[in-house]
Image (cartoon, rainbow, N blue to C red):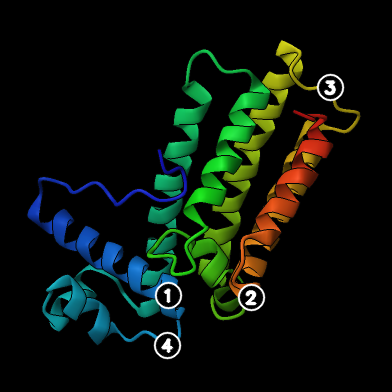
Amino acid sequence: MNVLYRPAMRSTTPEKDTRSAILATGQQIMSRKGFSAVGLTEILGGAGVPKGSFYHYFGSKDAFGEAMLEAYFEEYLGELDIILAKPGLTGAERLMLYFANWRESQGAFDCQGRCLAVKLGAEVSDLSEPMRLALKAGTNGIIARLTTMIEVGIADGSLVLPDAPEDVAASLYHQWLGASVMVKIVRTHDPFETTLQSTRRMLGIMR
């Protein structure tokens, strides 16, 4: 299971299909090129949608970016919820499954739509307040779910931590987000290996 990216579900309603196609195409292209470098013509051409149709669905490029981020995080958080609901796992095992999936899905240097938050985070936060808020809401949702996994681990005895679960969850997410940026810079997986070891130490998981 790839927790970090799953193509958007296609609706049976043609209008929603068209909107979803625009969002999915924009996500794939912008994950490679960034937000500012991509024009609407490239997105609509890739989606096979007439240019005049764009403003039927989105009021501006910024509004499109906001909707794209919201759709991305909706899928991402849905995958996290699957891990939370997966039977037979301790809290510690759920956390390590999440980070194993992160390392696998972000390991490709060409993200192909899988690392939108990593690619766009710094750029769009300076360009658009609605997009910044969409990123904030999405990342807060991830940290909240990691907090729940840690709380489950404390309850089932698989984790013993001196710090508040929400603080540990935020610290872990920040470390992995930084590692994803470094992987893009150094073009090796070494930052993930270092961060995985740090994660195990923080959680007291030595095996």
Disc 4: which residue: 37
The quarter of the picture where the C terminus appears is: top right
Instruction: State the residue at coordinates (56%, 50%).
Output: 103
Residue 198 visible somewhere in the drawing: yes
Q: Amino acid at mark 2?
A: Ile
Gap between marks 4 and 2 measured at Cα: 19 Å
Gap between marks 1 and 3 measured at Cα: 40 Å
Q: Nearer the viewer, mark 4 or mark 1?
A: 1
Gap between marks 2 and 3 measured at Cα: 34 Å
Gap between marks 4 and 3 measured at Cα: 46 Å
Q: First in sequence: mark 4 or mark 1?
A: 1
Q: Amino acid at mark 3?
A: Val
Report the front residue among 147 and 67: 147
Rendered position, 153 above or below 72 = above
Report crowding for label 4: few under 14, some 14 to 19, many 20 or more residues within 10 A (C-alpha): few
Q: First in sequence: mark 1 or mark 3?
A: 1
Rendered position, 186 above or below 190 = below
Disc 3: which residue: 160
Q: Nearer the viewer, mark 4 or mark 2?
A: 2
Q: First in sequence: mark 4 or mark 3?
A: 4
Report crowding for label 3: few under 14, some 14 to 19, many 20 or more residues within 10 A (C-alpha): some
Cβ–Cβ under 8 Å for marks 4 and 3: no
Q: Amino acid at mark 4?
A: Ala
Report the front residue among 109 and 163: 109
Q: Along the horizontal axis of the image, is 41 left or right of 98? A: left
In the image, residue 14 lies at what x, y percent?
8, 55
Q: First in sequence: mark 4 or mark 2?
A: 4
| Circle 1 SS class | helix
Instruction: State the residue at coordinates (68%, 25%).
Output: 92
Rendered position, 62 above or below 147 = below
